[in-house]
Image (spheres, helix red, strand yellow):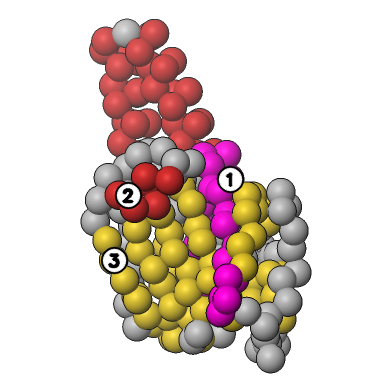
Amino acid sequence: MKKNNFLILSQGYNLILSVLVLSLISDLFISNTLSCIGYTLVLILAFIYRNPSRNNFTNEKNNFYSPIDGKIVAIDKSKNKQRIFINVNMCNTHLVTAPKNSTMTIHKIKNGLNLSSNTYKARKLNNQITLKFDNIKVKFISGFCNSNINFKNQITLKLGDEIGIFLEGLVIIELPLNTDINVSLNDKIYSNKTLLTKLD
């Protein structure tokens, strides 16, 4: 997959352009107040869909990086696996990237609601999709601002390749129990930049 080298993510182009055109029409024919609101919204959308430059990896075969920007809100261990919980809000960048060299498959899709991702009910009732990278699962649970979550299935990816966008919600990374986690609670992590674990 090709990387987007522009300042704005391609997924935001149509929305930003539509709001800009409406703002210009309002400025010319309707109301300066409405146009000012529209221009402000354009700037907000440009911030939401911004695309900062990130690392270019060459040989990172045994490393697993964060697939998205966010903050670690919990790390949970059970008998046979451990999970990293990442909160993604509207101030983060929203590009989802391949965390390792792998074939990505869609493990599970669940259609549901868009409740606040900070509640227990959201983990049961919200839209969610689980991606699988070899033996590691990455679950995306939508929040208020995700109408749907769309990723392509069965794609061979290189570390850092673009997968899609995820605006807001909870991301849960499920790792084997014997892996050493390289991050801690409350750490801010970054897509294609923060090392989560080194794989055997």
Q: Is residue 55 visible?
A: no
Which residue lies under the disc numbered 2?
126
Q: Amino acid at mark 1?
A: Asn
- The answer to whether 176 is drawn above or below residue 116 in the figure is below
Which residue lies under the disc numbered 3?
109
Query: Do the numbered discs 2 and 3 sit on residues whose CB atoms are within 8 Å?
Result: no
| Residue 92: mark | 1
Name the spot of residue 107 as percent of width and height, x first: 35, 76
Query: Do the numbered discs 1 and 3 sit on residues whose CB atoms are within 8 Å?
Result: no
Badge 2 marks a residue whose secondary structure is loop
- Residue closer to the observer: 130 or 102: 130
Q: Amino acid at mark 3?
A: Ile
Residue 83 among those drawn in magenta:
yes
Badge 1 marks a residue whose secondary structure is loop
Name the spot of residue 163 as percent of width and height, x first: 44, 68
Labels 1 and 3: the sequence-earlier one: 1
Q: Amino acid at mark 2?
A: Asn
Q: Is residue 83 visible?
A: yes
Q: Residue at x 57, y 66 (%)?
A: 83
**Looking at this rendering, what residue extends furthest in the front direction?**
79
Residue 58 among those drawn in magenta:
no
Residue 78 in which image quadrant: bottom right
Name the spot of residue 63 as percent of width and height, x first: 68, 81
Mark 2 → mark 3, Cα distance in angstroms: 11 Å
Mark 1 → mark 3, Cα distance in angstroms: 24 Å
Q: Which residues are magenta?
A: 78-98
Q: Residue at x 30, y 49 (%)?
A: 125
